[in-house]
Each structure stands twice: as structure tokens, then as C-alpha cells.
Image (cartoon, rainbow, N blue to C red):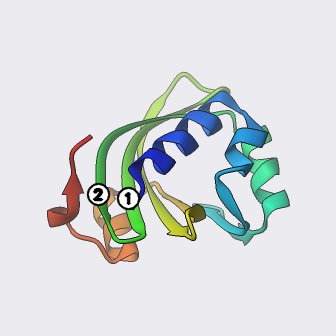
Amino acid sequence: MNLDLVRAFEQAVTAGDVEAAAGLVTDDIEVGGPRGSASGLNVFRRWVASSGISLETVQLFGRGDTAVAVQKASWAASADVHTVATEFGVRAGRICRVIRYDDGVDVALAAAGLGRTDELPL
């Protein structure tokens, strides 16, 4: 897993930089969360432009082309900070899957095929 790619993604999304974020993902990117999932670069671009999300990774797990980032997340519309876990998949040097889990890191790790022993240094 290219951890610099995950960090660059987080920075671009937090900045709301649609073009920088789009340059890091595949054309068929899968974007998902509590409201469901969808695929495609246009879906992804709309999400980056409208989400207003700020992310800060506080813990990271990964193996092969899969990672789960435990993140502090906040949205422009609220002052609340939430802990989320985001699954990342990588193909051919680009992110092909971004799925947010609000129901705990263990759920995200299981979905990604990872475990607590796959923790990586930040």
C-alpha cells in the first residue's frame, strides 16, 4: 500500500481540491459510506466538491493494496468531530475504492480483510 497516496488523497479532499483528488483515483472509483455506494469519476468529483469533509488520520492499517485509515472527521456544516474508518483500495498506483465506515474500526478492518496486526506506523 502506498501510504503517501492515502495521505495525498486526504489532503486533497480536506482542501476541497477536486482536480488534485481526481488525479489520485481511477476512472471507475468506488465511493461509499453510510448512505450507500456509487462508482465513477463524476460521482467522485461531485462528492469532493460537495462533502465539506475534513480528515485527519490518527491510526493506519494496511497490507498489499488495501488500507484502513482511522480518521477524525468533521464537516463544514457542523463543529462536531467524529471518528470514522475509511477503507482504501489501490490498483495500478491509483485509489480505486474509498468506503467510509461510521460503525467502528473493527467493521472496516473486517470488510477490508485486515486485522489489528496490520497496523502501520504513521
Q: Residue at x 73, y 43 (%)?
A: 48
Is residue 75 rendered to the left or right of residue 20? left
Give neighbour class at mark 1: few <14, some 14-19, many 20+ (Cα, 10 Å): many
Point out residue 67 in the picture as x, y percentages from the top left corner. Answer: 38, 61
Q: Quarter of the image containing the N terminus?
A: bottom left
Q: Residue at x 82, y 49 (%)?
A: 46
Q: Quarter of the image containing the C terminus?
A: top left
Residue where numbered disc 2 is placed: 61
Residue extending furthest toward the left: 117
- Which mark is drawn over residue 51? none
Residue in the foreground of this view, choosing between 42 and 121: 121
Point out residue 121 in the picture as x, y percentages from the top left corner. Answer: 21, 45
Residue extending furthest toward the top: 79
Residue in the foreground of this view, choosing between 12 and 76: 12
Residue extending furthest toward the front: 92
Amino acid on which the number 1 mark rests in the picture: Val
Residue in the foreground of this view, choosing between 85 and 22: 22
Task: Evaluate if marks 2 and 1 touch, with contact meaning CB atoms under 8 Å apart.
Answer: yes
Give neighbour class at mark 2: few <14, some 14-19, many 20+ (Cα, 10 Å): many
Q: Residue at x 54, y 40 (%)?
A: 8
Amino acid on which the number 2 mark rests in the picture: Phe
Check disc 1 and report its element: helix, strand or loop. strand
Point out residue 111 in the picture as x, y percentages from the top left corner. Answer: 40, 75
Relative to 60, does residue 29 appear above or below in the rendering?
below
Residue where numbered disc 1 is placed: 68
